[in-house]
Image (cartoon, rainbow, N blue to C red):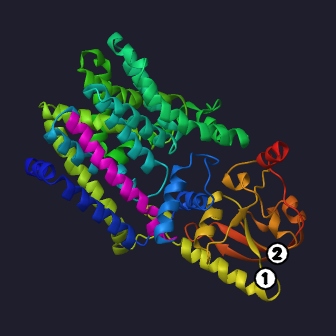
Amino acid sequence: MLTKTRLFINHHLFLTLAGVFLLRSSYLFINGLDLIGDEAYYWDWSRQLDWCYYSKPPMVAWLIRLFTELGGNTVAMVRLPTVVLGTVFLAYFYATTKAIYNAQTAALALLMVLATPANLIANFIITIDPPLYCFWMMSIYYLQHALFKGHLLSWFWAGLATGAALLSKQGALLIPLMLVGYLLTDKQRYVLFKREFLIYLFPIILCMIPLILWNQNHDWVMYGHSKGHFVTEESISLLKRLGQMLTVLLYQLLLLTPIIAVLLIIISFKLTIKLKELPAQEQFLVWMGPVLVLGFIALNGLQKTQGNWPMPFYFTAIILLSGQWQAGLWQKSVKYGLMLGYIFVTLTYALPVLIQTFNLQNTAIDPTYRFKHTQGFVNSIVAESQKQSIDAKPDFFLTVGHRYLTSQLAFYLPDHPQVYRYEDKGGVYSQYEVWPGPTQFIGKTAFVISELNGKNIPHELKDIFTHFRKVGEAVNPNDNTKVYTLFIAEGLKSWPARAVEQKQNEAE
């Protein structure tokens, strides 16, 4: 069966990729799942295009804007870039494996990556990961083409791909760093630093310049945010650290499926240890994946990490595992890994139906609860605001709480108005504090939605309005214990300047 499937892929690659694209894009339009907080947040970025944002480079916002301009501000169009990028990723993944090994190995590698829930999720949820994965894989393809086939122009295409990856996520800087490591391990490769590596580096630097300039003008907020991910918790107990490590490990097992995840970690250790004994092409793959997998495991032992961070590191590890399988190793393990993987993927696609069938909605084992009820919740907010329009019609919406509340309201409110966020801590904690506040609404009325209890509303917020009164409550449909307090705030007098705004004003 596996042999026949691989033969079909090799003879009908375009048909295979088209079928995957059709399945995934159809799922986007029929699943009925709302945008989660991050997706709505990035969509809100896309309405104000820029060279960079509070926590991430701009690629995800640019892509969402492109697709929503073409098809409108719908959930499916916001997410459609994931399927397009995911299909391009699969094409480059197959091509890279075939270039280094052969068509049979490439077909197996493609089957293996399709068997991971991580790949499915990256073709459904619009975050920074789908563009990062796509451009990361493109970088690997053009780099191997440049290194092992001597194509000078491929160095430039590789640089463009890495630049696009950098515009997707800061972690893409690991690609040129690992390339330097690979080149330095053999003196015969040093000559590439004189010309070829500089050709590769040129477009990357061009992509970095606008990121640096934007951050220079915005108090380096993105780099400050990124730095916060690498602050060691000094007082954390050994038991808590162990719990964090096991949680991240469990995340890998779920995203890659248990058998495939274990195999990839094992070969990452084995091939890194005997790196010098490997052919040059496999050495390159090890530097671009397994070395980083081991680095992530070490980092996970030192500080808190996120389970999705190492996902692009596994791409070349999967290629290497496929190569080992072709050489006669791990035959049964890979077979069982593929079987289990496709069971995981099938169950993931069927989750909405299974949850509905077995009446498990909003239970502890319902992983889809984050994708539900947002539209209904916003409708209740709209109904409450309309009740107040007789006495004081709201001119704008204002939130006090998590950025997700702000972005989801902005997406699901009628006509997608700009929704403002009041940061009660007074600092810059999201893109909403980078953007200007509602100063054009001086003297106007706001409808305020707060995650805080009415008695805990900051006096500073009340003081910037002439009148501030509670008008109702709304329950979080995904957490019945969480109640939002609703207010009418009349006569906006001023808006507090944040650190970024102050610096911009000083520069002007």
> Could you say which quadrant of the image residue 318 lies in?
top left
Mark 1 crowd level (few <14, some 14–19, many ≥20, 10 Å Cα)? some
Residue at 17% from the left image edge and 39% from the top image edge:
105
Please state which of residues 369 and 175 is positioned toward the viewer in this rendering.
175
Give the residue furthest to the bottom: 390
Disc ID at residue 251:
none
Residue 113: % across, % down: 28, 46
Please state which of residues 38 and 294 is positioned toward the viewer in this rendering.
38
Please state which of residues 243 and 267 is positioned toward the viewer in this rendering.
267
Mark 2 crowd level (few <14, some 14–19, many ≥20, 10 Å Cα)? many
Magenta stretch: residue 97 in it?
yes
Disc ID at residue 393:
1
Q: For the image shown, how many numbered marks are present on the structure?
A: 2
Q: Which residue is mark 2?
A: 445
Residue at 47% from the left image edge and 57% from the top image edge:
126
Q: Mark 2 and 1 residues: CB-CB less than 8 Å, in contact?
A: yes
Residue 46: % across, % down: 57, 59
Please state which of residues 291 and 439 is positioned toward the viewer in this rendering.
439
- Magenta span covers which residues? 73-99
